[in-house]
Image (spheres, grey):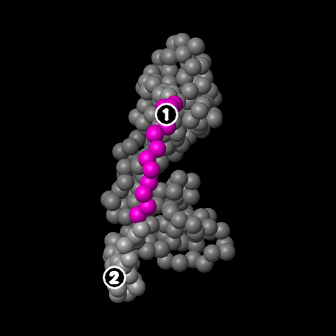
Amino acid sequence: MSNPVNKLIFNCLVQYGNVALPEVGSLKVEGTPKHVFFSEKISDDHILVTDIIAEQGNISAEEALALYNDWLAAARREDGSIYAEGVGTITPRHFDIDDELHRALNGNDIPVATLRKRSSLGWVWWLVGIIVVVGVAIYCISNCDCCSRQCEAPVVEEVVAEEPAEVVVEPAPAVETAPVVNTPAADKRYNVMVGVFTIKYNARACAKQDPLGIGKENYLITPYPRGLWAVVAYSTNSPAKAEEMRLKYRKLQKDVWVWKR
C-alpha cells in the first residue's frame, strides 16, 4: 500500500464504514460478515477522500484534489476498472475486495469472496413471494369444509345490557420537551460539549452522527487546548444555563460536560 491515498481509503472503510471517491462513486461496509458494496452514486453522508487528504496533509482543497486526480489516473486500468492496493478493484458492476481489507474487516477465518453490487431486481423476489402467499391462501379457502356445504348460522345469545361503569380518565403524564436547539457561537464562555478529538475530521464525523438529535448543522467544531478539536452542542455566557442544558443533554448521551473557555 505504497500510495498514501490507498491507505486513506483503507482507513475510512475500516474506521467509518464508508468512503466517497469523486468521479467514481461510493464504497460502503455493511452486514455480518462485513461486505463492501459499490455504488456509482456518491451519498452526501459519505466521507470524501479529498477532504481526508486535505486534512491529513494540511493542504488546500485544490491541492488535495490534484493529488487525488494523480492517484486516480494511476489507479485506472485499461479496461476502465480502478485498483486501490490493499482495498480492492472497482468496476461498474461489482467490487472485488483485497485480502488485506478483508482481514481488517472480518479476520482470517471467513473465506474471501467477490462482493457484488446490490441488485436492482430485489423487488422482483418480494413480488414472487407475495404471489405465492396469495395463491396458497386462495387454495386453502377454496378447499375449506365450510365452502362445500352450508355453514351453520352462529347461535346468538341474548346479552343483558349492564349499566356502564364510571370511567376515570387519568391525566396523561407530562412529556418533557426536547432541549432547545441553539446553534453554538465561538465567542461564548460556557460550552456544552459532546466530544473532543485529535483530528478535525473525526469531530466533523461526530457532528454528522448527531448524537443528541438536534441536527448536524447545530454543532460547533472549535479548537480545544493542546491542539484538539471540540464538538459543542450549546454555548452561553451563563454558567447556570450551561449546567441546565448539560443535564438535559445527558439524558440523551452520557458523556456530556461543560467547558469554560
Q: Position of residue 126 (x, y in %)?
A: 37, 73
Q: Amino acid at mark 2?
A: Gln
**Residue 158 sits above or below residue 197 on the image:** below
Magenta stretch?
156-170
For disc 1, the neighbor class at 10 Å (few under 14, some 14 to 19, many from 20) is few
Residue drawn at point x = 50 percent, y = 28 percent: 171
Q: Say which label, 1 or 2, has the lower sequence index.
A: 2
Q: Position of residue 15 (x, y in %)?
A: 57, 54
Magenta stretch secondary structure, dominant: loop
Residue drawn at point x = 36 percent, y = 45 percent: 62
Q: Are marks 1 and 2 in contact (CB under 8 Å)?
A: no
SS at mark 2? loop
Which residue is disc 1 drawn over? 166
Q: Position of residue 66 (x, y in %)?
A: 37, 51
Q: Amino acid at mark 1?
A: Glu
How far apart are the two marked residues, 1 and 2, measured between alpha carbons?
44 Å
Q: Which one is in front, 231 or 158?
A: 158
Residue drawn at point x = 56 percent, y = 58 percent: 14
Q: Residue 150 — which label?
A: 2
